[in-house]
Image (cartoon, rainbow, N blue to C red):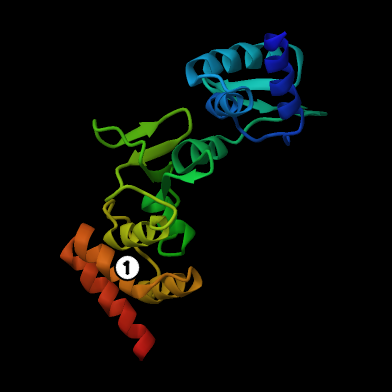
């Protein structure tokens, strides 16, 4: 009876989800732990078994290990899942916890510092492995190590400081890059003093000096 309860609970929750968003086995398992007061190991087994069963009979597709999505039928076939949405859910925002941020050439392009469009998205994440930078070929993203542990309070600051440091030496072709950065800081409501403190503690001296120069624009 309990097993039937698990399957119905999972199925009912999935029915309420929009099409085309990632459904993570780990998140389903954590939900089972809260709902049925079972341990996480058992919850993961139940989630894996039931998601596979649901996928065999409903509009649920397996994207990769641990990731499913609801596919909608259209005149052109079933809808697909955007890999970037999976990357964000894996490396940036997991279980409503910020663990990473977009960085590198893709972020420089996003904020207008370069017109170059990289092949991969770049993410700095707490899930970075000690064996160095790597590319997740399934999701077309490059994984980087953040300067410090990423949190909801610091990720925007680290993201901006990474852009200034520009470890990838991406060509900056904005006419006035310092003004682009200054405008981004103001638009994002970042605190210059916090940027200076983080730059002094975790980044090269050149990054600190650039932040100080950019801060001076406000006084002009």
Which residue is painted at 42% across and 69% down in the image?
190
User: Which quadrant holds residue 32?
Assistant: top right
Q: Residue furthest left?
A: 205
Q: Secondary structure at mark 1?
A: helix
Q: Is residue 186 left or right of residue 193?
A: right
Q: Is residue 132 left or right of residue 91?
A: left
Q: Is residue 45 left or right of residue 156?
A: right
Image quadrant occupied by the C terminus: bottom left
Q: Which residue is mark 1?
A: 195
Instruction: Rate crowding at label 1 as few (under 14), some (14 to 19) or many (20 or more) other CA atoms within 10 Å.
Output: many
Image quadrant occupied by the N terminus: top right
Q: Residue furthest front?
A: 37
Q: Residue furthest right?
A: 75
How many discs appear? 1
Q: Is residue 67 above or below residue 210?
A: above
Which residue is painted at 40% across and 51% down in the image?
151
Q: Position of residue 67 (x, y in %)?
A: 56, 25
Q: Residue furthest bottom?
A: 220
Q: Position of residue 4 (x, y in %)?
A: 72, 11
Front-most of residues 136 and 147: 147
Q: Is residue 77 left or right of residue 126?
A: right
Q: Is residue 203 visible?
A: no
Q: Is residue 56 above or below residue 193?
A: above
User: Which quadrant holds residue 11?
Assistant: top right
Q: Position of residue 120 (x, y in %)?
A: 43, 41
Q: Is residue 95 visible?
A: yes
Q: Is residue 153 above or below residue 216?
A: above
Which residue is painted at 44% across and 53% down in the image?
152
Front-most of residues 100 and 106: 100
Q: Position of residue 110 (x, y in %)?
A: 48, 58
């Amino acid at each position: 009876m309990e097993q039937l309860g698990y399957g119905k609970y999972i199925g009912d929750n999935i029915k309420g989800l929009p099409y085309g968003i990632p459904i993570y086995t780990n998140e389903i398992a954590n939900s089972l732990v809260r709902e049925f007061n079972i341990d996480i190991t058992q919850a993961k087994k139940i989630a894996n078994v039931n998601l596979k069963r649901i996928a065999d009979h409903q509009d649920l597709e397996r994207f990769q290990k641990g990731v499913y999505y609801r596919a909608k039928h259209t005149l052109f076939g079933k809808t697909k899942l955007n890999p970037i949405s999976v990357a964000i859910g894996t490396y940036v925002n997991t279980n409503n916890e910020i663990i990473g941020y977009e960085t590198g050439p893709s972020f420089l392009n996003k904020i207008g510092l370069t017109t170059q469009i990289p092949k991969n998205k770049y993410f700095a994440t707490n899930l970075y492995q000690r064996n160095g930078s790597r590319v997740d070929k399934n999701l077309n993203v490059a994984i980087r190590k953040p300067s410090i542990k990423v949190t909801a309070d610091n990720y925007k600051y680290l993201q901006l400081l990474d852009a200034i440091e520009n470890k990838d030496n991406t060509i900056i072709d904005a006419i006035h890059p310092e003004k682009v950065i200054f405008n981004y800081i103001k638009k994002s409501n970042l605190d210059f003093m916090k940027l200076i403190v983080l730059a002094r503690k975790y980044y090269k001296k050149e990054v600190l000096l650039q932040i100080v120069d950019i801060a001076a624009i406000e006084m002009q």
